[in-house]
Each structure stands twice: as structure tokens, then as C-alpha cells.
Image (cartoon, rainbow, N blue to C red):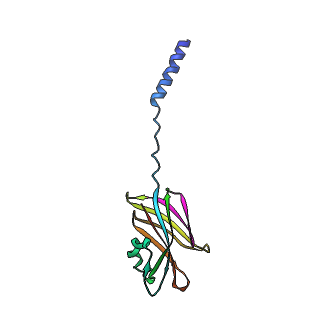
Amino acid sequence: MSSRLWIACIASLALGGAANAQPKKESPPPPPPVSCEFMEISASSGAAASMDADLEKLKKKLKKPPFSSWNQFKLLMKADKALTRKRVETIQLKMGKAEATLLGIVNGSQVRLSISIDDAAGKNFVNNTSTFAAGDYLVYGHSLPNNDGHLLALTCK
């Protein structure tokens, strides 16, 4: 076979292969992080009801059971975190720690979140997965000695 024929065959194969090559599919960009606010709250019962000004947006939730057994609420700590899908974020609390994992966005406006909360001694008192409306608040808590309470409220947008 002549060298010209070989060159023609190779060029034909190269062009044919390029024409049949599948274009590379670009993966979609990762979803943006979700902004969440965490508020650690001390709850107790006293003669006069009181609530820190920063907690006013939680007033309706805190007046309902099981939180209505307390009437004094004090903000201990507030933290803003950007949660990225499937990445665990640790929130250091005054009385323990919390770990939050964004599992995804559901129906475009609901946040699916996994939360785990440990007390200061390292004992886990919450291990939960919830789906809630963006902008709404979730409140988790547990009782302490002397009928006091330790709460963690969070909201995501």
C-alpha cells in the first residue's frame, strides 16, 4: 500500500472518530450554601416572665408545650453558619456542641437538615432529621436539674 493511501486511511479514521466523539457533559454547579442561624437558650421558671429581645421572634413557639413549662428565656449564644450539602458543621455551644448537616432543599423552599446536640458532658440529647420551611424555626431542648432547660433554636434560608 502506498504511503498516500495510508495517510488517507489514517486521516479518515481520525476525522470519523472525532465526528463520533460524544461531547463532554458538564456537571451542574454545586448548590449554593444555605445560611442558618443557631441560638442557644437557657430556660427557667420564675415569678415574672422574661425574654431577651433577640428571642422575640420565637415568642409564639416558646409559649407552647413543652416550652411553656418555662417562662424565662435568656440567649446564651448566637451563631450564623453557611451549610453546604452533605458537609457536617460543628457549632460550639456554651453548654455543649451541635452538629448540623444540610441534606438538601426539598420542593424549592424547604430545608432538609440533620441535627445532633450534645450537652456539656458529651451526652447526646438530640439526633434528628427534619424538613421545614425556609425561614421557620426549629426548637430542640432538654430539661436540666431544678426544672431549668437548655434549648437550641435554628432557622435556615
Residue 102 highlighted magenta (yes or no): yes
Residue 80 percent location from the top left of the image: 49, 62
Residue at the right extreme of this rendering = 121
**Where's residue 6, x and y in %?**
54, 16
Is residue 126 positioned above or below 15 on the image? below
* Most frequent secondary structure within the magenta stretch: strand
Q: As rendered, which of 104 and 122 lies closer to the eye?
A: 122
What residue appears at the point 37 percent right and 59 percent down from the top-left corner? 109
Please determine whether, in this image, residue 16 is positioned above or below residue 60: above
Question: Could you tell me which residue is drawn at 47 percent across and 26 percent down?
Answer: 16
Please, is residue 136 above or below residue 48 in the view?
above
Which residue range is magenta in the image? 86-104
Say how many tags the image has. 0
Residue positioned 45% across, 72% down in the render:
139
The quadrant of the picture occupied by the C terminus is bottom left
Q: Position of residue 85 (x, y in %)?
A: 49, 56
Q: Position of residue 69 (x, y in %)?
A: 45, 83
Occupied quadrant, residue 93: bottom right
Please tell me whether residue 28 is drawn above or below residue 150 in the rendered image: above
The N terminus - image quarter: top right
Is 56 one of the magenta-colored residues?
no
Q: Residue at x 46, y 64 (%)?
A: 37
